[in-house]
Amino acid sequence: QPLDHHCHTCNETLQQSFVWINDTGYERGGPVVLFLGGPSSKFNYQTRLSQFVKYATIFQCTFLLLEHRFYGISLPESESPFSNSNLKYL
């Protein structure tokens, strides 16, 4: 995704990590649910995933969990990802 959503001529991107994908209950034509993680790395979600598996089965959906920007490995490619110049993209 674009690093800076407000600059339409900038080409820098941010690789955001998918934490988890569950499609075990998916039925063709079912919905895709995207959960945007809060301020935490993907490793902190492991204890909460069982409820999402239950919902994915009930609603016959594919469930995606996306890591929040600037947490875990979803950082700008920079020697100083937490510099003042990069934090404006948070």
Image (tube, grey):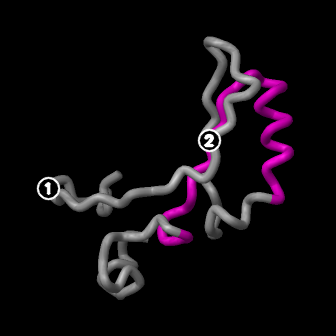
Which of the 4 image quarters holds residue 59? top right
**Nearer the observer, 44 or 83:** 44
Work out whether 90 lies above or below 48. below
- 48 part of magenta stretch: yes
Which of the 4 image quarters holds residue 51? top right
Mark earlier in primary sequence (1, 2): 1
- Using residue 2 as the reference point, say whether residue 57 is left or right of it: right
**Nearer the observer, 70 or 84:** 70
Q: Which residue is mark 2?
A: 64
Taking the view exactly as shown, the residue that stands out farthest to the top is: 28
User: Mark 1 against mark 2, which lies toward the viewer?
Assistant: 2
> Residue 46 bears which disc, if any?
none
Which of the 4 image quarters holds residue 85? bottom left
Q: CA distance from mark 1 to mark 2?
A: 30 Å
Type of amino acid under label 2: Leu
Residue drawn at (30%, 55%) of the image: 2
Residue drawn at (36%, 76%) of the image: 88
Q: Which residue is mark 1?
A: 9
Taking the view exactly as shown, the residue that stands out farthest to the left is: 9
- Using residue 73 as the reference point, say whether residue 36 is left or right of it: right
Residue 82 pos. (x, y %)? 41, 84
- Magenta residues span 47-72
Work out whether 47 lies above or below 24. below
- Using residue 66 as the reference point, say whether residue 8 is left or right of it: left
**Nearer the observer, 16 or 4:** 16
The quadrant of the rendering that contains the C terminus is bottom left
Q: Of helix, strand and loop, which one carries label 1?
A: loop
Instruction: Determine crowd level at label 1: few under 14, some 14-19, many 20+ residues with C-alpha closer than 10 A.
Output: few
Type of amino acid under label 1: Thr
Residue drawn at (54%, 71%) of the image: 71
